[in-house]
Image (cartoon, rainbow, N blue to C red):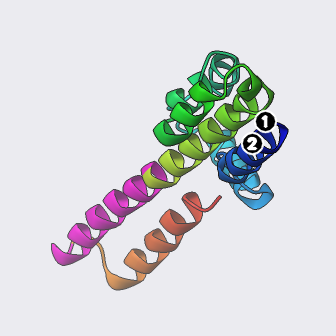
Amino acid sequence: MGKLVAIGLVVVFSGCAAGINSAQRNEYKAYEAKGYAVVEKNEGTASWMGILPGGGSFYTRNYGYGVINLLLWPVSILWDPVSGSNGAQSINYYATKANVEQMRRKELRDLDEQLATQKIDNSRYILIKNEIERKYEP
């Protein structure tokens, strides 16, 4: 029985939501400071839901791990709150990246339209394009 639990823990810990790395965390904070951050999942809610059987994993769309954590409950209380929080961080980071890219592309399309309709000249186009690129850097 002890070996089974140990194997289960290794499998679950190796597959838990990894969250984001420090560079991604810094990038997200920079976007947050600019007002671009997207919060699809609340980290606190994900942590608290991790106390419920598989709750943190289900909340962060990690359904397979949710089932495993459900089956391993109450032992899964040891890792599912952290896994849930990590999953929320990851979801928010990637949602923010997608949103920022969408905003950047829209502005660039609008700028291209201005150039094509000759509302601006080439030198103005390059200047504004550089401003847009800087605007959406983390």
Q: Position of residue 95 (x, y in %)?
A: 48, 46
Q: Is residue 11 above or below residue 101?
A: above
Type of amino acid under label 1: Met
- In this rendered view, identify the residue nearer to me: 47 or 103: 47
Secondary structure category for the residue under label 1: loop
Residue 127 within the magenta-colored segment of the rendering: no
Three-letter code for the amino acid on which mark 2 is drawn: Leu
Q: Which residues fall within the magenta stretch?
A: 99-118
Report the residue marked by disc 1: 1
Q: Nearer the viewer, residue 9 or 94?
A: 9
Viewed as shown, does residue 104 lie left or right of 119?
A: right
What percent of the width, then of the height, locates residue 126? Answer: 44, 79
Occupied quadrant, residue 124: bottom left
What residue sits right under mark 2 in the picture?
Answer: 4
Q: Residues within 10 Å of mark 1 (few under 14, many from 20)?
A: few
Residue sitting at the far bottom: 122
Write the residue at 44% across / 59% down: 101
Which residue occupies the foreground of this view, 61 or 107? 61
Look at 34% across and 84% down and name the residue there: 122
Q: Secondary structure at mark 2?
A: helix
Q: Is residue 13 left or right of residue 98?
A: right
Judge whether residue 36 can be spotted in this image: no
Residue 68 position by quadrant: top right
Badge 2 vs badge 1, beta-carbon distance below 8 Å:
yes
- Quick check: can you spot residue 54? yes
Picture quarter with the N terminus? top right
Q: Residue furthest left?
A: 117
Whether 121 is drawn above or below 100: the answer is below
